Amino acid sequence: MLCVRETPLHLGHLRLMTQAAEIGAVIMPPVPAFYHRPQSLDDVINQTVNRVLDQFAITLPDDLFARWQGA
C-alpha cells in the first residue's frame, strides 16, 4: 500500500510506482472524497484512514465514517 501525494509526480516517481504496482502494491493517493458530505476536517481524515484500513481488511469496532450505500 502506497499513499502518495497527488502532485507533482516526476518520471522517477512514476517509474517506482509502476514497479511497485507490478509486484502487487496498491497505490492510493490520499485524496479526500466529498460524496459523504463531511462536516469537519476530522470527517475527511477519518474517511481517508478507513479507506487505507479497508485495503488491509481491518475493520474498526466503531467505523470512522459511514460507507457508501449506493444511489
Image (cartoon, rainbow, N blue to C red):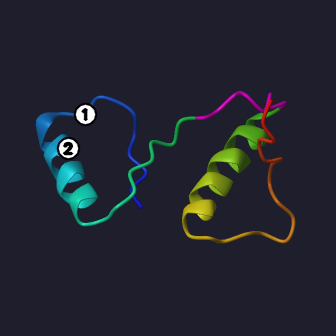
At which x and y percent is residue 16?
17, 52
- Residue 48 located left or right of residue 24: right
Work out whether residue 18 or residue 30 is closer to the camera in this orientation and state it.
18
Q: Which residues are magenta?
A: 32-39
Q: Label 1: state its secondary structure.
A: loop
Q: How far apart in space, not on screen, are marks 1 and 2 (Cα)?
A: 6 Å
Judging from the image, what secondary structure is the residue with disc 2 in?
helix
35 inside magenta stretch: yes
**Residue 55 picture location, percent across and down:** 55, 62
Q: Position of residue 22 (x, y in %)?
A: 22, 59
As displayed, is residue 39 above or below residue 57?
Answer: above
Please tell me which residue is depicted at 73% across the width and 28% down the height of the picture: 35
Looking at the magenta stretch, what is its main secondary structure? loop
Q: Above or below — where is 59 with respect to 42?
A: below
> 47 or 23, which is in the foreground?
23
User: Could you say which quadrant of the image residue 5 lies in?
Assistant: top left
**Relative to the observer, which residue lies in front, 44 or 61?**
61
Q: Amino acid under label 1?
A: Leu
Question: Image point 24% across, 59% down: which residue?
Answer: 20
| The label number, if any, that marks residue 64 in the structure image | none
The circle drawn on residue 9 is 1
Number of numbered discs = 2
Q: Residues within 10 Å of mark 2 (few under 14, many from 20)?
A: few
Q: Callout 1: 10 Å neighbours few (<14), some, many (20+)?
A: few
Q: Are marks 1 and 2 in contact (CB under 8 Å)?
A: yes
Q: Which residue is mark 2?
A: 13
Mark 2: amino acid: His
Tell me the quarter of the picture where residue 57 sits: bottom right
Is 15 included in the stretch rendered in magenta? no
Give the quadrant of the C terminus: top right
Name the residue rendered at 42%, 61% in the picture.
Answer: 1
